[in-house]
Amino acid sequence: MSPTVEERLAAARAHVESACQLLLSPTPDKLDGCAQGLAAAVVEVQACFPDASPAGGDRVSGEAARAEAERLRQSIGRACQLLDHAAAFHSNWIRWLGALCAGYTQRGEPARLEHGPRLVTRG
Amino acid sequence: MANLLAVLSNSAGALNAYDQVLQVTQNNVANASTPGYAEQSLPLQAMAFDPSMGLPGGVQTGQLQSARDEYAEQAVRQQNTALGSSQQLATSLQSLQSIFDISGNTGIPLALNQFFTSASAWAQNPDDTSCRQAVINRAGDLAQSFNSAANQLQTLAQNTQTQLQSTVDQVNQLVGQIATYNRTLMESGRGAKDMGMDAQVHSTLEELSQYVNFTATEQPDGTTTILLNGSTPLLIGGQQYAISVQMVGPPADAANPSGPPAAQLTAADGTDITAQTTEGQLGALLNMSNSVLPSYMGDANQAGSLNEMAQQFADRVNGLLTSGNLSDGPPPVPGVPLFDYDATDSTDVAATLTVDPAVTPDQLAAIDPGPPEASNGIPLTLSGMATPTNDDDMIDGVSYSEFYGQMAANAGSQLQAAQNNQQVDQSLLAQARNQRQQLSGVSLDQEAMTLVEFQRAYEATARMITVLDQLTLDTINILPTS
């Protein structure tokens, strides 16, 4: 017996919630894990389509699935805010670092902090 | 000659200081492309100037500083301010929502239903005294329900005022603590600021950030300057500028000169800073006091939805009863109004609504003179107000029950939004604290590498979120509506 639309949406939400947990402490590694979790959620939601459409017949309880989908959207919104916040933190830090290291451009923007090509060896 | 020597010495000192700053700046510029290089700044400090004491003035360089920790500290404080605001709003709105019961089992909705039911029973037996008495009793219950809701709102407003005062006291007390640290530094010199004091200052600032939005900057002498909302001084050096809150009544020429007072936050110089203070617990309490509660209980310029409802309902019922007749006459004897309230203050209608104790059952007019005349026309119209079909029996285009439902739903949706914000803000604060930890725990070289990796990872994650959100929206749109 394949999962119902509601179950798939709940599974997608679980993936998004896991991604939110990773976003609480955003490192590049964790962000990669976050993207993987979100990709798994995408797969779950895509799998809903055949059953969610009107042709899906009795396989879907509209009201319950809709409520679960709204909860999923709320979780996605939280993930989005966490990502935006984390990105703003780092981009502002880069801008600040640029302004402090190289001053401001003629247009009053913080100068860009350029990172030259470099080779990293780890042993 | 002594003066000339002092001037020369002063100039030499200044040149030396500027040279050091230039070196640091050159170093910063030279390292602009160096991965992980963190800015270094060299603050200039004014030296004492008093020729009579042989103090030539001028400038000297302070200690090298890194901007990194302050940036992370500020990010945490900003998030703490956001959480303080959403947490306070959620708590206050929880109290507001509890006043508006939407189950229909208590309060105004129940009293409204019972009033309409009694009017319906009266319409079936227009001459029955007990039916008429029941209408008077149910009207009394409804008036009491309005009184009770108005009193609960009044209590909530008073509690909010008390919280405002204690929050302002707390802000002043925390700023006072930092003022004490500043004075210690000013007396003992910058060297007195050891790691312990630094931690205490930051801990106090973090605590302060839940109450208000502010900017804190460390001065060359090590003291902390605090500006409320980035502009109003709270602390400069050893001088604290205390804020205060007052409840200010409406002006005499206001629409409701006797309406409830508004909270006014005042800076030390007497400037009104209420409008600028929108964040933190203090901002949430001001919003509750000056915006949310007045929408229900009124203020200088509005009656408030609860008062509007009470007044319009009472006026409509009274209008119907006085338009009807007790007997055909001649001459016809008109009915008397049932409800009474303080008509001099539109913000006090719900609190003062009563049933005129002098009204007796035989004074309730049942006859609608028409044409066509109907012996039970008035009670029929009264009971019909439950499901109105004409504008006279509605308020803002809906029935009285629906209008009440809208008030309750408004409180509920505001609460839900505040609770959602609170949940998100808690996560964002945890994230900011983790980022602060990451920023201070990683080597600068490693950090710069990480920033580039971050950019790539953010973009990948953001794309995935966009796809997922769109797919979920598509799913909602194709789900069958039941």
Image (cartoon, coloured by chain):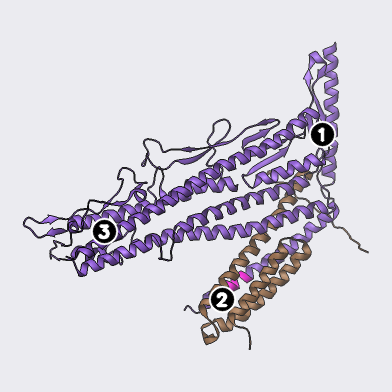
Chain colours: A brown, B purple
Tell me the crowding category of disc 3: few under 14, some 14 to 19, or many 20 or more residues within 10 angstroms, Cα based. Answer: many
Range of magenta residues: B468-472
Task: Assign a secondary structure to mark 2.
Answer: helix
Q: Is residue B413 rendered to the left or right of residue A119?
A: left
Label 1 neighbourhood size at 10 Å, few (<14), some (14-19), many (20+)? some
Specify the farthest residue to the bottom. A1
Front: mark 1 or 2? 1
- Residue assigned mark 3: B136
Please, what is the three-letter code of the amino acid marked with disc 3?
Ile
B477 shown above or below B148: below
Q: Which chain is disc 1 placed on?
A: B
- Label drawn at residue B192: 1
**Kind of residue indicated by mark 1:** Ala
| Res. B59 image quadrant | top right
Asked if badges 3 and 1 are on one and the same chain, I answer yes
The amino acid sitting under disc 2 is Thr
Distance from the alpha carbon under mark 1 to that under mark 2: 63 Å
Q: Nearer the viewer, residue B9 or B48?
A: B48
